[in-house]
Amino acid sequence: MEPGDEKVVDWNREWRRLGLVVDRCNDVDGLMADILIAYIKPAADREPFVERYLLHNSVISFGTKITLVLQIAKLPGAPKIDGEAIRKVGNLRNAVAHVPVSRGVRYNMNALMGKTGPYFVAETMQSGMRFTERNRDEVVLECLETALRVYDDLVALRDFVDRLNGPPPAGT
């Protein structure tokens, strides 16, 4: 939303966008968990435990999963993974998902700088622990585009790890 696009804040729009960002990032997180499960290859009766408890976000963070997946991506013959892009997804997700929507509302009252009215910002972390305010629309779009690009790379890595493991044993 650009300054002045609306005279009132559209909270429902912001919450829907937040849900979309979290959903897409959960897809990336779930795919990283799939890669880790395929690499660890727990016994069939233990796989639900590994997936539900060990790889749960409250136990292993998104950042830790990234580190582990990038190590797997170093295997000979593994497809190339853009580690910076995966980290960007996490950082942009955090900028949108871990800050109350209301904290990002700004109001442009200067008609000389464009239309007057509310608009949204997100704080993104830069190097050196500095925060920068960015237009929330741009942050959401960049997060979704990066998540989509990273997803395809992660699918290729998951398929690679599956091929390394060979076919599942008979009877599983």
Image: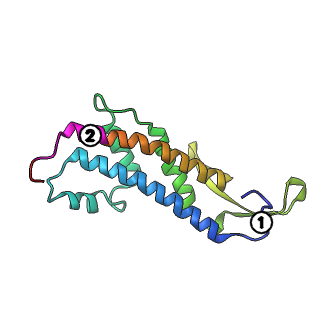
Q: Secondary structure at mark 1?
A: loop
Q: Mark 2 belongs to which amino acid?
A: Val
Residue beneath the point at 18% across and 39% down: 166
For the view shown, which residue lies furthest in the top direction?
Answer: 76
Picture coordinates of residue 140 (x, y %)? Answer: 59, 54
Residue at image x 32%, y 38%? 71
Q: Residue at x 33, y 44 (%)?
A: 68
Q: Nearer the viewer, residue 74 or 158?
A: 158
Toward which corner of the image does residue 50 lie, by quadrant?
bottom left
Residue visible at 68% across and 53% down? 135
Numbered badge on residue 161: 2
Question: Gap in Å between the C-alphas at discs 1 and 2?
Answer: 49 Å
Q: Where residue 156 sits in the image (x, y, percent)?
A: 36, 39
Report the residue marked by disc 1.
Answer: 6
> What amino acid is at disc 1?
Glu
Residue 23 in view, yes or no: yes
**Where 172 falls versus 98 (above or below)?**
above
Queried whether the magenta region covers residue 104, the answer comes back as no
- Labels 1 and 2: the sequence-earlier one: 1
Q: Can residue 100 be seen from the camera position used here?
A: no
